[in-house]
Amino acid sequence: MRRTAWNPAKCWSVGLALGMCACMTPRASAMPSGRAWIPFTVMDVAGSTDYLGMPRLDYDEGGAPRFVMAVRWEGSPRHLWSNFEWADSGWVRTIISDVRAGYWPEFAITSSANRAIAFLSYYDVATGPFATWLAISGEGRSGVASPDSVSLTTTQSTEYGAAASATRRWAIRSEQRAPEYEFHVRVFYSDTLRSWHEVPRLGLDEDHCTIAPLGDTTAMVVYAGLSGLQYAILDGTQWRETGNLDPRPFNASHPRLRLRRSGGL
């Protein structure tokens, strides 16, 4: 089998070896002359006495850092988002949202001001412990908007993400499907709030995926797995072009796309 089981003994051995190397190193490196760390910032969330978790750091369309994390991580209500925006020399926190989420957020790659995050919603009695919703919420200085449910999915799948242009949103998910228990890349698009459409699935057994806009109604998908490292271009509702970047099966993982300020990806 290609997926190896987690071995605690090996992990402890590696961790111990790294720890010993760190302890035995006789010198420390200093920062370059003229540079220094700025003071620490405590990311305190007023009104929350429970754990913070699942942080995600990125930057907006203007290049300014932005930060989102879950608050009340192990309390009730569960997994609510809090946004932070960088303002000149410090973080400014926006309001705590009432959007529940059970897994790490992924910032949508957007070519417009339509910022959003994709996440898996916390399961409830209706979906059960192994099913959840892939959801997208608008995100900005005023907080996180009410989620838009894209599709029911499973918690035993792998990556997901989102993209947005001025007129369209896309969502992507590498999902394990029965009875073959292989991973297929599912892609959805939406031109209207609360309405999502799925296009033909991609890949043979693909663990990881990402998506980014190319235009108002076109997007690029990159996925990794049995196909190696593969890309596909979605033009409207049809796959227009595909290509292989690395044919080695299961060699690549966690592909990511970024918009270049000069244009392109």
Image: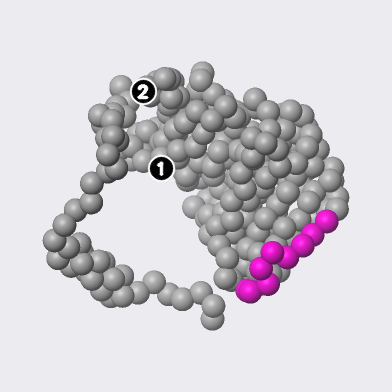
181 left or right of 197?
A: left
Residue 112, numbered circle: none
Is residue 137 at least partly visible in the picture? no
Residue 228 is covered by the magenta coloring: no
Could you tell which of marks 2 and 1 lies nearer the N-terminus?
Answer: 1
In this view, the mark in front (2 or 1): 2
Q: Secondary structure at mark 2?
A: strand
Q: CA distance from mark 2 to mark 1?
A: 21 Å
Residue identifier under label 1: 54
Q: Position of residue 116 (x, y in %)?
A: 59, 32
11 left or right of 260?
A: left
* Quadrant (top left, top right, bottom left, bottom right) of the N terminus: bottom right
231 left or right of 255?
A: right
Q: Position of residue 110 (x, y in %)?
A: 65, 35
Residue 195: quarter of image: top right
Tell me how the rendering is colored: one colour
Q: Which residues are magenta?
A: 241-249
Is residue 5 at least partly visible in the picture? yes
What amino acid type should be assigned to the residue bearing mark 2? Gly
221 left or right of 239?
A: left
What amino acid type should be assigned to the residue bearing mark 1? Met
Q: Position of residue 5 (x, y in %)?
A: 43, 75
Camera-side residue of 68 and 62: 62
Q: Position of residue 151 (x, y in %)?
A: 66, 45
Camera-side residue of 75 and 13: 13
Residue identifier under label 2: 90
